[in-house]
């Protein structure tokens, strides 16, 4: 059986599979300097990690939905209605206070991050035998790889990082629950390793991309949340491992691999200049959004003296619409591929 690459072996490896391992290597090599880097170069880490990767990857969804004329016409009601619904939900949640709003959004974000990893596993398992044991085993390991670190976060002493804001998750400190979770985690990982070895000995086949996704997820979530307790480490492993593979998937699968008649004007992006424009468009939109967040809400990296405190109940839900829509829309647009 051939390897189930989404695009090609080289592009899949470098752009989808390798980022998690690369950034983990960076963390271990520079771990003694990370706190100093965060302190001295906070603006540049924010610009590169948050704007250029995290926010930018949200807008990559446009190249599978709103920017594809045939796709937009096919699901026009969904693409118009969902952002409106997200805004109204945001207004409703913010009515209970900003803490409730950010807490709900944080849980939705975590679910989205977990489901993306599961989605990649399903894509790379698409050529394997369709059996319940295969599907359940894949789900068990990828959900364990992501849920255990979150449980550790919930049950441990306060971490030095947040998903969005402080006190966004319900927490209950319990060493007993941490121990139970850790033992369960170890047993599932052991099951995954033993089953993978058994299947290789039985079939002489090893699914390289699927297992690299699983191992990369295990490592990035464990070291980003459990092993290290550092804001920059968490951001690096969280953002890079999630954002870059998603942007690569959009370009490789939804632009480069499709004929002109399917993607219309996006056909012009299928060359080296097109890749550059693809990246610049994402960065440009992302920077615009984040600049609006800065001047109207955060006032951390940019502050032009606008007092918008009394309008937060509208501005925050409105500015969150692209992100919230991205979280929910992914549940629809990839459904047939999982």
Image: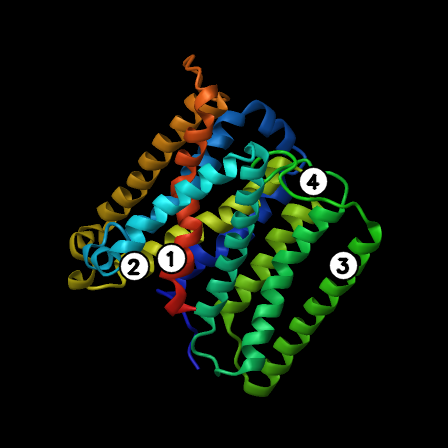
Which residue is disc 4 drawn over? 229
User: Around disc 2, counting alpha carbons within 10 Å, would you say few (fewer than 14), some (14 to 19), or many (20 or more)?
Assistant: some
Are the two marked residues, 4 and 1, in contact with CB atoms closer than 8 angstroms? Answer: no
Earlier-in-chain disc, 1 versus 2: 1
Q: Considering the image in quadrants, where does the N terminus appear?
A: bottom left
Residue 180, image x, y percentages = 80, 60
Q: Residues within 10 Å of mark 4 (few under 14, many from 20)?
A: some
Where is residue 176 drawn, in percent x and y? 84, 54
Q: Which residue is mark 2?
A: 254
From mark 4 to mark 1, how far is it between C-alphas?
30 Å
Check disc 3: other Cα within 10 Å, few if <14, some if 14-19, many if 20+. some
Report whether 164 appears left or right of 253.
Answer: right
Residue 241 image position (x, y, % from top left) = 51, 50
Is residue 286 visible in the rendered structure shown here?
yes
Mark 1, other Cα within 10 Å: few <14 / some 14–19 / many ≥20: many
Q: CA distance from mark 2 to mark 4?
A: 37 Å
Q: Give the labeled residue for mark 1.
A: 249
């Amino acid at each position: 059986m051939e390897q189930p690459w989404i695009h090609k072996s080289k592009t899949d490896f470098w752009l989808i599979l390798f980022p998690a391992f690369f950034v983990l290597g960076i963390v271990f090599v520079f771990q003694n300097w990370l706190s100093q880097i965060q302190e001295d170069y906070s603006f540049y880490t924010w610009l590169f990690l948050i704007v250029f990767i995290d926010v930018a990857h949200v807008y990559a969804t446009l190249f599978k939905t709103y920017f594809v004329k045939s796709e937009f016409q096919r699901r026009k009601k969904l693409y118009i209605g969902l952002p409106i619904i997200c805004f109204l939900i945001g207004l409703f949640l913010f009515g209970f206070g900003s803490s409730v709003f950010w807490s709900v959004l944080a849980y939705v974000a975590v679910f989205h991050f977990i489901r993306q990893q599961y989605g990649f596993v399903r894509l790379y398992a698409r050529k394997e035998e369709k059996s319940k044991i295969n599907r359940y085993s894949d789900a068990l390991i990828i959900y364990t790889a992501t849920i255990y670190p979150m449980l550790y976060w919930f049950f441990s002493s306060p971490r030095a990082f947040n998903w969005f804001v402080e006190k966004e998750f319900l927490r209950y400190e319990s060493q007993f629950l941490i121990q139970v979770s850790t033992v369960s985690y170890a047993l599932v990982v052991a099951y995954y390793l033993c089953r993978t070895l058994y299947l290789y000995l039985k079939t002489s086949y090893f699914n390289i991309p699927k297992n690299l996704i699983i191992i990369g997820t295990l490592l990035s979530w464990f070291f980003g949340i459990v092993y290290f307790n550092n804001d920059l480490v968490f951001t690096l492993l969280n953002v890079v491992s999630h954002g870059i593979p998603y942007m690569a998937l959009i370009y490789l699968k939804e632009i480069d691999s499709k004929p002109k008649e399917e993607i219309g004007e996006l056909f012009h992006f299928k060359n080296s200049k097109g890749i550059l424009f693809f990246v610049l468009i994402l960065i440009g939109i992302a920077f615009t959004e984040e600049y609006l967040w800065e001047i109207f809400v955060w006032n951390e990296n940019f502050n032009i003296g606008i007092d918008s405190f009394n309008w937060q109940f509208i501005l925050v839900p409105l500015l969150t619409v692209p992100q919230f829509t991205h979280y929910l829309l992914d549940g629809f647009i990839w459904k047939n591929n999982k």
